[in-house]
Image: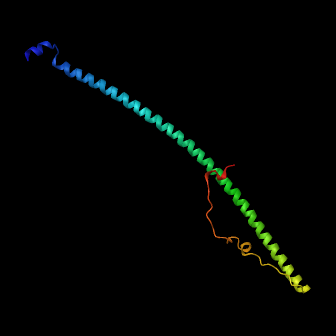
Amino acid sequence: MASKQQLLPTSPGSDGDERKRKRKLSNRESARRSRIRKQQHLDELIAQEQKLVDENKKLREMTDSTSQLYLNVESNNNVLRAQLAELTDRLCSLNSVLQIASEVSGFAVDIPDIPDTLLEPWQLPCPVQPIPASVDMFQY
């Protein structure tokens, strides 16, 4: 045992210093790897953020165009409803004129009834069936 101590000319404190030095070096390397991982994670998050921002912008544009399309369809429906109401009133007036003419002339005129769907457009003459929709339905 004494011969081993003589072969190694080191002081008892230098072994501890060597450990400290190795530990410091190891800690520095670990911190460097940690910083690299942190930077990579940050880069991934920034790329993901940009992807989400782009997707959000695309979805907003799609929502805006769909809303505009909806407003156009709603406007057209309002015009059609107004035209339906006007034409129904005209038909009622013409039926009244025919009724009076038939009573005055004595000729029997067959005056068809106004269909309920014209008087009550919210009641459809056929059962309601689902309307299939697709993503490319509103392409322009």
The picture places residue 34, in percent across and down from the top left corner, at: 37, 31
Tell whether 58 sits left or right of 72.
left
Q: Which residue does the image show at 69% across and 60% down from the upper left?
A: 74
Which quadrant holds residue 118?
bottom right
Q: How is the image coloured?
A: rainbow
Is 50 positioned to the left or the right of 92 in the image? left
Q: Is residue 140 left or right of residue 33?
A: right
Residue appearing at x 76%, y 66% in the figure: 82
Image quarter of residue 17: top left
Residue lying farthest left? 2
Q: Nearer the viewer, residue 19 or 51?
A: 51
Seen from the viewer's position, the closer of residues 69 and 14 is: 69
**41 is higher (above) or lower (below) than 6:** below
In this view, the residue farthest toward the right is: 105
Compared with 30, 75 (above or below) is below
Picture residue at 73% right of the left edge, 60% below the top: 76
Task: Please say if 71 is above or below 26.
Answer: below
Give x and y (percent) for residue 85: 76, 70
Rendered position, 32 above or below 124: above
User: Quarter of the image containing the N terminus?
Assistant: top left
Residue 109, by quadrant, is bottom right
User: In the rendering, at what x and y percent does residue 129 appear?
Assistant: 62, 66
Tally of numbered discs: 0
Residue 105 horizontal/vertical position (percent): 91, 85
The residue shown at (63%, 61%) is 131
